[in-house]
Image (cartoon, coloured by chain):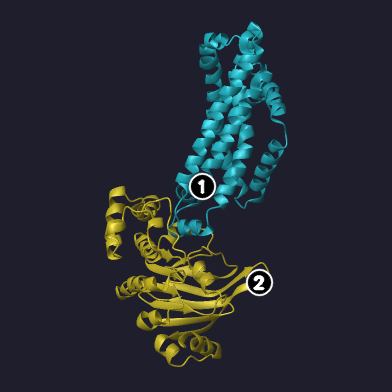
Amino acid sequence: MFASFDFDVIWRTLPYLFLEGMRFTLMLTVLATVGGVILGTLLALMRLSGIKALSWIAAGYSNILRSLPLVLVIFWFYFLIPYIGQWITGASRPMAVGAFTSALVTFTLFEAAYFSEIMRAGIQSIPRGQQSAGYALGLTYWQNMRYVVLPQAFRNMLPVLLTQTIILFQDTSLVYVLSITDFLGAASKVAQRDGRLVEMYLFAAVVYFAISFALSRLVKRLQARTAIAR
Amino acid sequence: MIEIKNVHKFYGAIQVLKGCTTTVSKGEVVVVCGPSGSGKSTLIKTVNGLEPFQAGDIVLDGISLKDPKTDLPKLRVRAGMVFQNFELFPHLRVIDNLCLAQEKALGRTRAEAEAKGRQLIERVGLSAHIDKFPGQLSGGQQQRVAIARALAMDPIVMLFDEPTSALDPEMVTEVLDVMVELAKSGMTMMVVTHEMGFARKVADRVIFMDRGEIVEDARKEDFFGKPRSERAQMFLSKILQH
């Protein structure tokens, strides 16, 4: 049944698919994860701070973003960021924002909502006595967080954080709505140019599966290794 | 050294401390005992500001905890605290547990902190375990590390919150031995404990608490000889039966 298929098209376009498409996908995934975890951790700290206004803002933020479809948020930010940029800098025209920057900002802000929930659970999983011990030794709030609570919270939550990253890796393909050439976008362009839809989409599926599956196996291994002995 | 003046504390509508007043002088060892829920752990945690209180005042080394200008982290360095559940940092090796606050709160260099840490770990007899993680040690060993960690900050007073309550019976002695040695070295200590043997051996005074009140605050000889209050008599007869 594969007789009429031309799998050679994959070989011919491999450099384009990976050096352009996959490079973009991985860069977006990694940078949005790093940004999302940092922002998410700050949101989690705000949520747990006991200061009503801060915790209300953080809760509102993650509740709103988690209730919106990602595609909508991507669109929204793509068209909105130039105007926000204009407003902030006071320029006379909407700021020119590249597609990559726009996608990165969107994914960072969107993922932060999810990472904040994960980090909140992680921080709450650390017994209160640990914080008391830190305070009793004369550490300040930030020192206590930096050296006592967050390292343990990260370690406990590493498998969940990585699982969220795998989801993010797949979700980055949604940037196709901005006509950005991520891995799926590159495959899709080749497919339509050469009329090889089945081959290219099949190949894209295999690649996404292979990477996601390999990562989830890695998560399993980490889970076993990082459990802290108490 | 510690002055507790008419301290009241509420959890919502429930009053857990009802006007507690006492003092601990330099070099004194004071044991706080009483039935569970009597507020003794809460009282000792108010001394270094871990538990806030609503009325009254506590003066630690001449500095008032009620004063909003008081730099709590700085003040806490002077009061070492040992917890019921040890609360070593499980992600740090023993030596790093001892060094962390020395470096971050006292600004000592790593070399100074390590020298101090090694000296104290030797004092509690655990030099062989310095590179292990807390999870690799027994409960008694963990509590001795916790005592060394608190001592590393050069506190002027040590607070113990039921230091042997979470330990298996065979490990209680090793921890008490360290505490007895510490008391004999002249350290000012406030100890919440049920270990009456420890109290008999090294305490200067015994405070008996019940339902958030200090019912009895007496010299050791008087307390074990003939406590004045009925509640203290009952408590003693219950725990000294065995």
- In the image, the chain rendered in cyan is A
> According to the image, label 2 marks what residue?
B14
The disc labelled 2 sits on which kind of residue? Answer: Ile
SS at circle 1: helix
Question: Toward which corner of the image does residue B198 lie, by quadrant?
Answer: bottom left
SS at circle 2: strand
Vertically, is A201 above or below A167? above
Distance from the alpha carbon under mark 2 to that under mark 1: 35 Å
Q: Output the chain of dot 2.
A: B
- In the image, the chain rendered in yellow is B
Q: Output the chain of dot 1.
A: A
Q: Residue at x 33, y 51 (%)?
A: B108
Labelled disc at residue A156: 1
Front tag of 2 and 1:
1
Badge 2: residue crowd in 10 Å (few <14, some 14–19, many ≥20):
few
The disc labelled 1 sits on which kind of residue? Answer: Asn
User: Which is nearer the eye, A38 or B86?
Assistant: B86
